[in-house]
Image (spheres, rainbow, N blue to C red):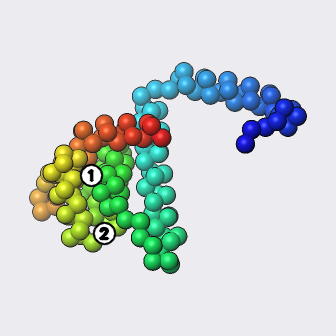
Amino acid sequence: MALQPKEAEGFEPFLRASTLAMKRSLVTVSADDDEHELLTIAKHLYSARRRRAKAFAAYSMAFHEPPWDMLLDLYVARMERRMVSATSACIAADVPTTSGLRWISTLRQRGLVDLSSDPADGRRTIVRLSDRATETMERYLESL
């Protein structure tokens, strides 16, 4: 809904200041700012999905997309330089461990995640978003 000319009176200084601030921010954006913005978007998407699931739980509505939840969580972890165990990835996807491990296997087969042993505890498997998946996720987040 656009403001009519009469309704827009008095907003001109605000609009000019907002436009100028936006232009300045576009000029001074650095790679770190871009990464921070993408990280914020990914966190917001993941958090919104959790809130949506909780809000509709009473209606027995399930909004499960385990691989997407895993990818979002793994992207956030990669940007924050955190390691994620396979068990934690399953928890992030809000699915039973057996289902989560099947999804991790599928994501690995498609080249979206890499697996490695935890250097501190060889019994634990670390799941990491692949470089290719990270680039794809960033292109997607930039498009929002």
* Relative to 75, 60 lies left or right: right
The CA distance from mark 1 to mark 2 is 19 Å
- For the residue marked with disc 2, what is the amino acid? Val
Q: Please rate how many residues cluster around mark 2, counting C-alpha atoms within 10 Å: few if below 14, some from 14 to 19, many from 20.
A: some
Q: Residue shown at 47%/32% (left/top)?
A: 33
Q: Is residue 36 visible?
A: no
Q: Residue shown at 74%/38% (left/top)?
A: 2
The secondary element bearing badge 1 is classed as loop
Sequence-wise, the earlier of marks 1 and 2 is 1
Give the label on residue 83, or none.
1
Residue furthest to the top: 27
Q: Residue shown at 45%/60% (left/top)?
A: 49
- Which is more toward the observer, 90 or 110? 110
- Which is more toward the observer, 54 or 8? 8
Give the label on residue 117, or none.
none
The secondary element bearing badge 2 is classed as loop
Q: Pointer 1 and pointer 2: residues touching (CB < 8 Å)?
A: no
Query: Where 120 falls versus 11 (above or below)?
Result: below
Query: In which quadrant will I find the N terminus?
Result: top right
* Relative to 80, 16 lies left or right: right
Q: Please rate how many residues cluster around mark 1, counting C-alpha atoms within 10 Å: few if below 14, some from 14 to 19, many from 20.
A: some
Residue 122 position within the rendered picture, expressed as x and y whole percent measured from the top left: 11, 58
Residue 86 position within the rendered picture, expressed as x and y whole percent measured from the top left: 22, 60
Q: Residue shown at 82%/36% (left/top)?
A: 4
* Relative to 20, 14 lies left or right: right
Give the label on residue 95, or none.
2
* Relative to 134, 35 lies left or right: right
Q: Is residue 104 visible?
A: yes
Residue 41 position within the rendered picture, expressed as x and y whole percent measured from the top left: 47, 45
